Image (cartoon, helix red, strand yellow):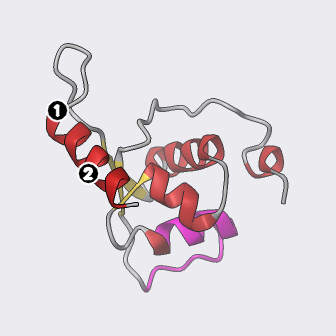
Amino acid sequence: MRPYAVTGGRTAPKLKLAMEALVSSATAEHREFSHITPEYKAISQLCLQVRSVAEVSALLRIPLGVARVLIADMAAEGLVRVHQPQLEAGRPDVNLLERVLSGLRRL
């Protein structure tokens, strides 16, 4: 399905999400999913383990912008919890940057 169809044509999320923000499912595994979209169901199931927004995008093979819109919508509905990174004076955490650099070197 085309990304604009999945997001209803929206390109900006309701909530500003960093790609390293962590997402966890706020729903139980046995919850009834008949009234939510397949994308919401996939994100909810994937986030039973805490994942970053970037991981959700990559694992579901959807563009990062689409993942941000969907996750922000789900957070507004209480389907997921979003844990934003703490920025000190607008700067990213040095420990986070070091972990990212270390991960890139391992690739």
In the image, 44 versus 104, the foreground residue is 104
If the image is split into quadrants, where does the N terminus sit? bottom right
| Quarter assignment of residue 39 | bottom right
Q: Position of residue 59 (x, y in %)?
A: 55, 67
Q: Position of residue 94 (x, y in %)?
A: 16, 32
Left or right placement of residue 87 versus residue 28 in this view:
left
Left or right placement of residue 25 versus residue 62 in this view:
left
Left or right placement of residue 74 versus residue 85 in this view:
right
Q: Position of residue 104 (x, y in %)?
A: 37, 51
Left or right placement of residue 62 versus residue 41 in this view:
right
The answer to the question of whether label 2 and label 1 lie on touching residues, with beta carbons closer than 8 A, is no
Residue identifier under label 1: 94
In the rendered image of this protein, does residue 36 appear above or below residue 63? Answer: below
Q: Residue at x 66, y 49 (%)?
A: 63
Q: CA distance from mark 2 to mark 1?
A: 12 Å
- In the image, residue 38 lies in the stretch drawn in magenta: yes
What is the magenta range?
Answer: 30-44
| Quarter assignment of residue 30 | bottom left
Q: What mark, if any, has residue 102 been given in the picture?
A: 2
Q: Residue at x 26, y 51 (%)?
A: 102
Q: Amino acid at mark 2?
A: Ser
